[in-house]
Image (cartoon, grey):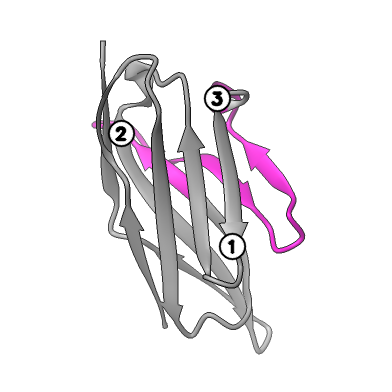
Amino acid sequence: QVQLVESGGGLVQAGGSLSLSCAASGSVAGISVMGWYRQAPGKQRDLVARITSGDFRNYADSVKGRFSISRDDAKNTVYLQMNSLKPADTAVYYCYVGRIRFGLSTDYWGQGTQVTVSS
């Protein structure tokens, strides 16, 4: 099992910045992709950004140029730097980790952290 602990959410005014982090622990061998999803009230959970073990990154169109994802494999931690925040970015942000072990792919999710952007 992999446990994920997120931190860094909160309340910020539009145009401000927040940084999220997510630390993985437990059976972390084989972690390949790490990323962030978000879910606003009444909406589905959507990808925000992801980063592979080969350092390939992709972003949702709505956050390109404003958000930046990075990872520190020595700490098994993924980060999301969010700049120029908009009220539309308000959501619960979930950390995600994909692990491949013995040929099996397993996804793990954090508990979620609230990000609220006021106008």
Q: Earlier in the sequence, mark 3 or mark 1?
A: 3
Residue 66 — which label? 3
**Of circles 2 and 3, which is in front?**
3
Would residue 73 be found to the left or right of residue 56 on screen? left
Residue that lies at the very extreme toward the bottom in this rendered image: 102
Query: Which x, y percent locates residue 64?
Result: 61, 26
The residue carrying pointer 2 sits among few (fewer than 14), some (14 to 19) or many (20 or more) residues within 10 Å by Cα, namely many
Q: Residues within 10 Å of mark 1 (few under 14, many from 20)?
A: few
Q: Amino acid at mark 1?
A: Asp
Question: Pointer 1: what residue?
Answer: 72
Of the residues tagged 3 and 1, which is closer to the observer?
A: 1
For label 3, the SS is loop
Mark 2 vs mark 1: in front: 1
Q: Residue at x 47, y 58 (%)?
A: 96
Q: Which mark is residue 27?
A: none
Residue 9 placement (x, y as % from top left): 29, 42
